[in-house]
Image (cartoon, rainbow, N blue to C red):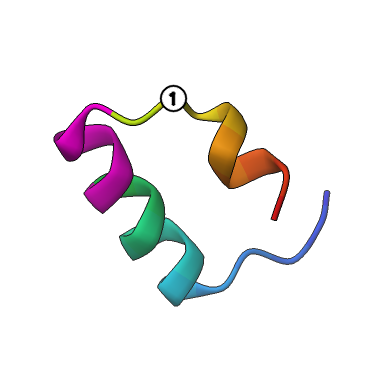
Amino acid sequence: MESIRTSDLYEAAYYLSEGYPPESIACR
């Protein structure tokens, strides 16, 4: 598994709460 940073998890939760598609996170 790839190393996941806390900032990435926080960003993911923020985007999910806003309703953004998870694809935008995976592309980064």
Residue underneath mark 1? 21
**Image point (83%, 49%), residue name:** 1
Whether 6 is drawn above or below 24: the answer is below
Taking the image as shown, residue 18 lies to the left or right of residue 22, namely left
Task: Report helix, strand or loop for mark 1.
Answer: loop
Q: Position of residue 24 (x, y in %)?
A: 56, 39
Furthest-left residue in this view: 17
Q: Amino acid at mark 1?
A: Pro
- Which quadrant holds residue 26? top right
Neighbour tally class for label 1: few under 14, some 14-19, many 20 plus, Cα within 10 Å: few
Whether 1 is drawn above or below 5: the answer is above
Whether 26 is drawn above or below 20: the answer is below
Residues rendered magenta in the picture = 14-19
Taking the image as shown, residue 27 lies to the left or right of residue 7, namely right
- Which quadrant holds residue 3? bottom right
Residue 20: within the magenta? no
Q: What is the quadrant of the C terminus in the image?
A: bottom right
**Image point (73%, 44%), residue name:** 27
**Image point (34%, 31%), residue name:** 20
Q: Position of residue 19 (x, y in %)?
A: 23, 27
Q: What is the magenta segment's predominant secondary structure?
A: helix
- Which quadrant holds residue 9? bottom left
Furthest-right residue in this view: 1
Closer to the camera in the image, 11 or 6? 11
Closer to the camera in the image, 6 or 15? 15
**Image point (39%, 49%), residue name:** 12
Count the numbered circles shown: 1
